[in-house]
Amino acid sequence: MAAMARKLTSLRGSQIIVALALVFLLVLAVMAVTGDLMAPMNAARQSLRARLMPPGFEGRQGIHWLGTDSVGRDILSLIVAGARPAILVSGFAVALAALFGVSLGMFAGYRGGRMGGLLLYITNIQLAFPFFLLAVTIVGIMRPSIPLVVFVIALGCWVPFARISYSETMQVVEQEYIEAVRVMRGGTARILLRHVLPNILPNILVLATFALGTAIVMESGLSFVGLGVPTKTPTWGRMLSEGRDYISTAWWLTFFPGLAIFLLVLSINVCGERLRDITDPKQAGKQ
Amino acid sequence: MQVFLRQAILGILVVLSALTLTFILVRLSGDPTSIILPQDATEAQRALLREQLGLNQSLVTQFLSYLGNAVTGDFGKSYFDSESVTSIVMRHLPNTLVLAGASLAIACLFALPLGVMAAVWRDGPVDRFVQVAAVIGASMPSFWVGLLLIQVFAVGLNLFPTYGTGSAAHLALPALTLAIYAFPSLARLTRSSMLEVLPQSYVMAARAKGMPESRVISRTVLRNGMVPVLTLLALEIGNLIGGAVLTETVFAWEGIGRLAITSIQRRDFPVVQGVVAYVAVGFVIVTFLAEVAIRFVNPRLRHK
C-alpha cells in the first residue's frame, strides 16, 4: 500500500511539473509570436539615468521588475523580446534537421545495404568531432546571418534523426504489409510516406523535442561568443555576454537571461521525457 | 584487427574532412590580404602578399600544398604575429588538457558512484536525485553555470579568482563548470548500463554461489557495465572540448577553445584552421585509445 501511495503521489507530482512546463512553453510561444507586444516596456529604449538599476527599481517607465542593463534597458522586456529569436531560430533549425535526417534515414533504411552503411559512416565522421567548435568555425568565418545560424544548428542536430529513422525504417520494411503494398505496385514514395513515416513518427517527435532543447542551448551559445543571429535588441546569449562585464556589480544582468534559457530548455526536456514515456511505455522510467 | 583498421580509416577521413572544410570556408570568406594589410595598402603591396601566400596559384595546387604542409604539422603563420600556428596551438593546448582532465575527473568522481548506486537501489532516494539532477543539469547552458559559479564563489564568497589562467585556484571554477556539463550523460549512462547487467544470469550465478553482494557489484556488474561507459567517455572528451570553447570564454582560460574564438573574432584564419585540425587529430587518437581500452576491459570483444 505504502509503495503504491508513493507511486501515485510521485506520479501526480510529475504531472504537475509537466503541466507547469507546458504552461511556461505556451507563454513563451505566445511571446515568440507577438514579440514586443507582450513586453511591459519598450525593450529598445535606453535611459542613461536608469543604468544598471537592481530588480524592483522604479524608473520613469514604471517598475523594472528584473532591473536594467548597462544602457538602462528593461531586462524583463529584453527577455520577452529575446524569446522570438531563440524559439524561431531553433524551431526552424530542428525542422530542417528533422526533414533532412528523416528523409535520408528512411531512404537509406528502405534501400538498405551500401546506402545504409554509407549513411552510418557519414554520421560517424560527424560525431567524431566536437560540433560546437565546428559551428563557431563555420559561422565565424562566413559571418553570422539568420539562414547561416539556422543551417549550422540544423547541421548539429540532424544525426540522431537520420540514425533513428534509418534503423526504424529497416524494421518496418520487413513487415508483411509493406510487402503487400509492393505487390500492389505501390511506389517507393508511397511506401515511405504512407506506410513507414506514420510508424516512425512518434519517435521522431520525441527526438525533435529533445533536439529543440539542444538547438536553443546551441543558439544561445553562439550568441554568447558573438556569433548569433543579428537582432536589434540582444538575444539571450548576447545579454549574458554583455552582462559578464558587470558580473561583480550587477548580478541580474546575467542571472535572468540565463534563467530564461534554463527554464525554457528544462520545460522542453520535461515534456520530452513525458512524451517518450507515452510513446514508448517500455522505456518509461528506464532512463 | 579489422576493427582497428576501420577505426584508423575513419580517423583519417575525419581529419581530412576537417582540413577540407576549413580550407573551403577560408577560401570562400574573401581576400585575406584585406585582413592582413592596413586599409590604405596599395594594390602592388596586395599583389606581393598574394604572391607570398601562394594565393594566385590554382585552387587545387593551393589545396594540395595546404594538405601537404598540414601533414607535416605546418599550418603557416598567424596573420597578426609571426609565430607559427603549431607553436601557438601547442602553447594553449596544455591548458585545455588540464581543464578537460580535471573536469572529467570531477565528473567521474560523482557520476560513476552515483550512477551505480542509482541502479542498485532503483527508485530509491539516490536514484531520484540522479534522475532529477540529470534533467536539470542537461538543461543548464554551461556558460550560465560558469557565470553563476563566478557570482557565488568568486564575487560573493571571494574564494576563487573571477577569471584567468595559471594557478589551481583559477582552475577550480572552470573545471567545476565543465564537470557539471558532463555529469548528466555520464550518470545516466552508468545507471542504465548497470541496470542492463544486473538482471543477467551470470550475476545471479555469482550471488547463488555465495559471493558477497559488494563483490558481485564490484567485480561482476561493474566490469560488464563499464564497457558502454568507456565508449561514452571517449565521446565525452570531444563534448568537453566543445564545451570548453564556451567555458574558456567565460573564464578567460587560455586554452584552445578561447584561442579559437579570439582567432575567429580577429579573423586569424591560419590559427583557426590549426585549432580545428589539431582537435580533430586529438579526438581521433582518443577514440582509438578508447577502442583499445574497451577490448582490454572486455576480452569477449577481442575476437569479434
Image (cartoon, coloured by chain):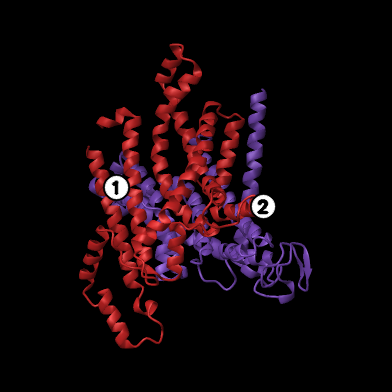
Chain colours: A purple, B red
User: Element type at marker 1?
Assistant: helix
Residue A98 can be seen, yes or no: no
User: Up-down: is A162 above or below A172?
Assistant: below
- Disc 1 is attached to a residue of which chain? A
Label 1 sits on residue: A110
Marks counted in the figure total: 2
Rendering coords of residue B159 (x, y %): 64, 49
Quarter of the rendering occupied by the N terminus of chain A = top right
Using the rendered view, name the quadrant where residue A139 is placed. bottom left
Residue B154 can be seen, yes or no: yes
Rendering coords of residue A100 (x, y %): 37, 57
Q: Tell me what residue is drawn at x 52 percent, y 32 percent.
A: B113
- Disc 2 is attached to a residue of which chain? B
User: Up-down: is B263 above or below B228?
Assistant: below
Q: Which mark is residue B158?
A: 2
B144 vs B255, left or right, is: right
Rendering coords of residue B86 (x, y %): 34, 60
User: Up-down: is B222 above or below B43?
Assistant: above
B235 vs B299, left or right, is: right
Q: Tell me what residue is drawn at x 38 percent, y 61 percent.
A: B88
| Mark nearer the viewer, 1 or 2 | 2
**10 Å crowding of disc 1: few (<14), some (14-19), many (20+):** many
Rendering coords of residue A243 (x, y %): 62, 64
